Structure formats: structure tokens, C-alpha cells
Amino acid sequence: AQKITQTQPGMFVQEKEAVTLDCTYDTSDPSYGLFWYKQPSSGEMIFLIYQGSYDQQNATEGRYSLNFQKARKSANLVISASQLGDSAMYFCAMRGGAYKLSFGAGTTVTVRA
Amino acid sequence: DAGVIQSPRHEVTEMGQEVTLRCKPISGHDYLFWYRQTMMRGLELLIYFNNNVPIDDSGMPEDRFSAKMPNASFSTLKIQPSEPRDSAVYFCASSGFGTGGGSYTFGSGTRLTVV
């Protein structure tokens, strides 16, 4: 069984600062993928970044980077230079060998001007 | 690429009525997923298909829920009869693992309200 844990229900961050969103996971699959999605107040699910379990380097996509620590089973998302438009709910998700994508509870980020 | 298309965007129905949600996946994607999102339970996987075949429906909450994928470009999620506790946002997502990476693309969702 897969389990994804996001322990931060909500966070505030000042505009232009960086913020780290925590995600830990548990799986028995030797091969898996980790994802982060953004859900703004409009409701759509927006893919941000992907990390494969065998990838040697941490994934980066523009202002998003994924801090992957395999031994600790953590996949934290770092958003650099926060913008007002980054205010949203952020979900960590994991795909196991069966291709099912399971989600954490989410973290609400509010960016302050 | 038009993305994953869901219809309707909003649905309000009375308890006991049949509700049908529709999804058109991205062309070429061989996996299709149905999720439900509520405040209490978060994002739950209801069922998923591979090459139009249901692979895992263990997340379908009750027999009132059924899903079909008659061809590669269309899927439905049906609730009959609907109940107020079915009120939620229902997402469809598709993915093409054969193309590598395997990013999941979500539709805009259907907000269902059962009164």
C-alpha cells in the first residue's frame, strides 16, 4: 500500500521569499514516481514537477525544485521567489508499480505582499 | 492538444436521480483515472482503466457508482441513485506511460451537487 503524508495544513510566505512544502511517503514498490500538483482556487489540477525513484539528480522546473531524499522517503517541494499567483493548495502524489496515483492531504500556501 | 475534457462542469441534481459524468482523455493516452475530491476525504481514486479495460475499481464507494470506457476516447462515471453525500468534485485524468515520464493530466473537473 502507498501512503503520502503532508503534515503542513497551511503556510504563509512573504512575496519573493522561498518556501518548502514537506512530503513523506511510504511504499514497497522498488520503482515509483513522485509528483507535485498545484490547485488554485479555480479548482484545476496543474502538474508542477516529477521525480523518478531512480533519478540521480533532484528535479527542477523553473522556480520549482524537488528535494528528493530517498533514504528518508521524503520529496519536499521548494518554491523559490514566491509570487502572489503561487497562493494555492499543493498536493504531493506518488505513483507505484500499478500506475495508481495516490495523493497527500495537501498544503495551502498563502503568499503575502 | 485540447487536454482532458470533462462535462458537465457543474451538475445540480435531486437525490435519487441518475447522474452521468463524461470524460474525453488525451488522444494516445492509454490510462484513464476517475478521482473524487471532498474536503473530508481529499482526493480519492475511484477507478482506473488501461486500454479501455478497468484495472482497479476498489475505490468505487458503492454499487451505486459505475464507470465505463467503451473506447479510447470516452469514459463515463454514473451514479444511480445519487445521494447528497455524493456531492464532490469529480476529476478525470489520463496518462500515456508508453511515451515515458507518465505525467497525469487532469480535466477541469465536474462539481456535483446533490440536493
Image: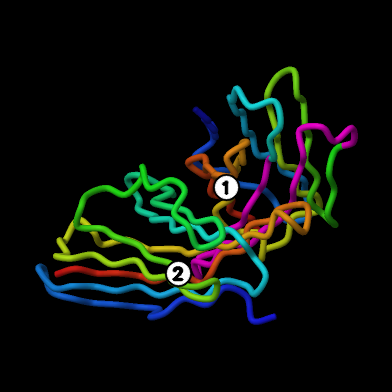
Indicate the chain on which mark 2 is placed: B
Q: Is residue A56 magenta?
A: yes
Residue B41 placement: quadrant: top left
Rendered residue at 89%/32% (across/down): A56
In-image side of A99 versus B56 (left or right): right
Quarter of the image with the C terminus of chain A is bottom right
Disc 2 to disc 1, C-alpha distance: 16 Å
Q: Residues within 10 Å of mark 1 (few under 14, many from 20)?
A: many
Whether residue A17 is situated above or below residue B71 in the rendered picture: above
In-image side of B66 versus B97 (left or right): left
Circle 2 sits on which residue? B109
In-image side of A15 versus B31 (left or right): right
Q: Could you say where residue A46 lies in the image, as x and y percent from the top left?
A: 63, 62
Q: Could you say where residue B52 lies in the image, as x and y percent from the top left?
A: 50, 63
Taking depth in this image into account, of B54 and B62 the one nearest to the observer is: B54
Taking depth in this image into account, of A49 and B97 the one nearest to the observer is: B97
Q: Is residue B43 magenta?
A: no
Specify start and end residues of the magenta stretch as a single range.
A34-57
> As shown in the figure, which amino acid type bears the numbered disc 2?
Gly
Circle 1 sits on which residue? A91
SS category of the residue bearing label 2: loop
Give the label on residue B64, or none.
none
Give the number of the mark in front: 2 or 1.
2
Rendered residue at 62%/75% (across/down): B3
